[in-house]
Image (cartoon, grey):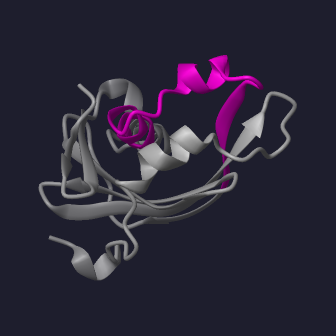
Amino acid sequence: MDGTFTDKIHKLDVRVYYEDTDFSGVVYHANYLKFAERGRSSFLRLAGVIHSDLLAHEPPLAFVVRAMNIEFVAPARIDDVLTVETIFTAARGPRLRACQGIRRAGELLWHAEIDAACIDLDGKPRRMPAETVAQMAAWLTEKPPDFTASQRG
């Protein structure tokens, strides 16, 4: 349900349903963000970083996406099984950095670089708890994969 790790790459399979597509049966562009969020959240959960635990922290904390650089390479279609690949490259201070790719049978369809921040409920940046940083340390990858259009197929 939460995917698996291969080395330090988290992989989560998702199926494209009718609700994910536009009128032509192609995945609507904004829905790739939902798939990517599921990948990041599942990675964190398996790494021991639980969103509800951060909310129970004093002060309550949460992660927000600060910036995202996206490339749409090829379309996914209804009934496709996609694999969301997620790696984290940094977790220090209030910042988390991730790289993600979405593939269908190995073909790269979409990739993104994500900068996230840990904030309090007033929206102010906060350092991640030391426990969170320690949990993430074992899963960080210094050199992310090169998700480029040349990696198709």
**In percent of the image, x 27 and y 30: which residue is there?**
2
The quadrant where residue 141 appears:
bottom left
Residue 88 seen by the camera:
yes
Residue 30 seen by the camera:
no
Taking the magenta stretch, the answer to whether it contains residue 143 is: no
**In percent of the image, x 34 and y 77: which residue is there?**
146
Q: Is residue 18 above or below residue 70?
A: above
**In percent of the image, x 23 and y 36: which residue is there?**
3
Q: Residues in magenta?
A: 39-66
Taking 145 as reference, is 34 left or right? right
Q: Count of labels shown?
A: 0
Image spot of residue 130 (x, y percent): 59, 44
Q: Observer-nearest residue: 23 or 153?
A: 153
Image spot of residue 71 (x, y percent): 47, 67
Taking the magenta stretch, the answer to whether it contains residue 43 is: yes
Image spot of residue 61 (x, y percent): 70, 30
The quadrant where residue 63 appears:
top right
**In percent of the image, x 32 and y 73: which residue is there?**
145
